[in-house]
Amino acid sequence: DTAVSQTPKYLVTQMGNDKSIKCEQNLGHDTMYWYKQDSKKFLKIMFSYNNKELIINETVPNRFSPKSPDKAHLNLHINSLELGDSAVYFCASRGGGQSGELFFGEGSRLTVL
Amino acid sequence: AQSVTQLGSHVSVSEGALVLLRCNYSSSVPPYLFWYVQYPNQGLQLLLKYTSAATLVKGINGFEAEFKKSETSFHLTKPSAHMSDAAEYFCAVSDHAGANNLFFGTGTRLTVIP
């Protein structure tokens, strides 16, 4: 079973549309994240949730809205898509204790035309 | 605040040669340091991590890294490169194991020449 799974893996859409990316983790972790990776491979954190509560909300447009229905899921909804939103979006989760590392999904490549 | 700097966005080595990918960190407290690898069209996978135990850390696929506090470095090495090592490598830092955020470097693309 995939530990952190994201759907869809690829998403092509027109400017102005609204789209969602879903993420689920089966690791029993309390903390989940969304990262954006641009065309230069730079990874930037967008949001982090701990047990369904928002704990990190970096400077991203309010067109991006995360939702965590339970601690195993963290979805990302994007309104009014723009060309600059084209990127690969990664979901990740982290366990507690002394582990510290993030477990990443395989990414969702969003292309806005 | 924590940050990492990866020197060299691209590194090319011949198959069988030593791999050395550089990472320097900035942290006001003893850091936790990580190396991740990203193969094409995949997510990031943990190679190894330093969490204040042994300064020489061994990871998967024959990689290792040495924490040097005096140099604020955590360089990644592998004695002999394989073609399968071609990927993007990211160094990351946090201020403790339970930190809410990892700060990633800009990545180094490793090319292995046959």
Image (cartoon, coloured by chain):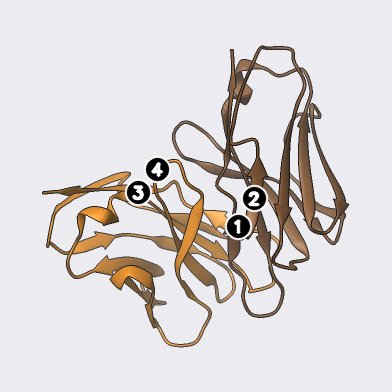
Chain colours: A brown, B orange
User: Residue B46's spot in the image, x, y percent?
Assistant: 48, 64
Chain where mark 3 sits: B
The quarter of the picture where residue B81 lies is: bottom left
Packing grade of label 2 (10 A; few <14, some 14-19, many >=20) is: many
The amino acid at mark 1 is: Thr
Nearer mark to the viewer, of 3 and 2:
2
- Separation (CA) of disc 4 from disc 1: 18 Å
Residue position for label 3? B108
Tell me if label 4 and label 1 are in contact, CB under 8 Å: no
Packing grade of label 4 (10 A; few <14, some 14-19, many >=20) is: few
The answer to whether residue B1 of the structure is visible from this angle is: no
Circle 2 sits in a helix, a strand or a loop, which is it? strand
Answer left or right for B83 relative to A2.
left
Residue shown at the point (42%, 77%) measured from the top left: B69
Nearer mark to the viewer, of 4 and 2:
2
Tell me if label 4 and label 2 are in contact, CB under 8 Å: no
Residue position for label 1? A2
The amino acid at mark 2 is: Ser
User: Residue A37's spot in the image, x, y percent?
Assistant: 54, 39
